[in-house]
Amino acid sequence: MKNSKSILLFASILAIIFVFASCSGDDDNSTPQSRNIKYEITGNYSGRLTVAYSDEGGNSQTIDVNSLPWSTSLTVDSDVSAIAIAATNSGVNNPGRTGETITLKIYRNSEEVKESTATALENGFIELGISYSFN
């Protein structure tokens, strides 16, 4: 039951991130912009994480990450208006420890464009999400 609530909460947070990230601007910029993206998770969190991130087409991909640091790089399609990454612990069987941290970063063309850090609660629970909109 506790694991189901955790997954439901994570799914809700992720849905909110993707809804806000998918909003498109009305700017008509005819100059193509490079969309080389790198997602990165660092920190000392010892639990297993479930990570969801936007892929090349703006679709959500979900993976399990067993240890940090973790990263992946991709080139996002030109019709994608925004991207996001979110991480949460993978249920009650593999929690981290109180006070451990994760930092999520999004890089565009090797330049950091978004960063945020979260700290695990008393029960080892941790969750964090960030998004980035293309101009």
Image (cartoon, rainbow, N blue to C red):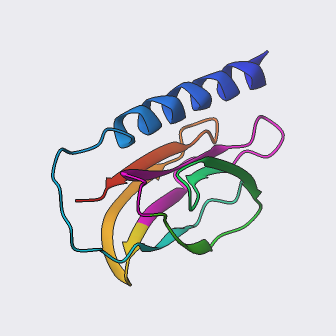
Which contiguous range is marked in magenta?
78-105
Q: Where is residue 68 in the image (x, y as percent from the top left)?
A: 65, 70
Q: Is residue 87 rendered to the left or right of residue 24?
A: right
Q: Is residue 33 above or below residue 55?
A: below
Please say whether residue 87 is one of the residues in the magenta stretch.
Answer: yes
Q: Which residue is drawn at 22% across and 59% down?
A: 135
Q: Residue at x 76, y 25 (%)?
A: 3
Q: Where is residue 132 in the image (x, y as percent from the top left)?
A: 34, 55
Q: Is residue 108 above or below residue 78?
A: below
Residue 97, visible in the rendered structure? no
Front residue (pair 32, 73)? 32
Front residue (pair 28, 86)? 28
Q: Is residue 82 rendered to the left or right of residue 94?
A: left
Tally of numbered discs: 0
Q: Residue at x 65, y 22 (%)?
A: 8
Q: Is residue 48 rendered to the left or right of residue 124?
A: right
Q: Where is residue 33 in the image (x, y as percent from the top left)?
A: 30, 74
Q: Which residue is drawn at 84% across and 40% down?
A: 93
Q: Quadrant of residue 55?
A: bottom right
